Amino acid sequence: DVCSSDLKQQGFPLATLTDAATIAWDVSTAQKAKVTLGGNRTMGAVTNAVEGFTYMLWVIQDATGSRTITWTTSGAGSFDFGTPGAPTLTTTASKADLLAFEAITIGGTLKLRYCGTQKGFA
């Protein structure tokens, strides 16, 4: 019965990543995460990705804005943006973008393969 009281909303809590020169993301404890950029940053390769899982990342500009991310793109757990390359993120102060990734092994390397972005949330 679809209306059964046993059915409950399901999801993953939103974890806060620590802002640092190189941002670390352990996706085993943070399948959905957010980070507020306090400067130009590098997104390190993720740890503990599982093939076939989807991972979501909110990138939030601080009150200063104009922050950028350089993505780690080689090695296991790195990011793959395909032929178009990494998206240009919103740089407006206090705005946010949501990025989606799917973990899949291609050519023997498990990476977070980029699925898309929604930009400019306030």
Image (spheres, grey):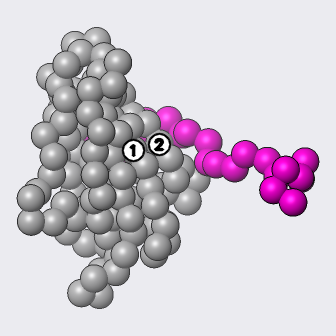
Specify the principal SS of the magenta part.
Answer: loop
Above or below, 27 against 66 in this view is below
Q: Secondary structure at mark 2?
A: strand
The answer to whether one can see residue 19 in this image is no
The magenta region covers 1-24
- In the image, farthest residue toward the top: 63
- In the image, farthest residue toward the left: 84
Residue positioned 79% across, 47% down in the render: 8
Horizontal relation, residue 103 to residue 16: left or right: left
Q: Quadrant of the N terminus?
A: bottom right
| Along the line of sight, the residue nearer the viewer: 96 or 72 | 96
Q: Amino acid at mark 1?
A: Leu
Across and down, in percent, residue 73 comes to 19, 63
User: Residue 33, which numbered label?
Assistant: 2
How many marks on residues?
A: 2
User: Residue 93, which numbered label?
Assistant: none
The answer to whether one can see residue 95 in this image is yes
Please tell me which of labels 2 and 1 falls first in the chain. Answer: 2
Q: Secondary structure at mark 1?
A: strand
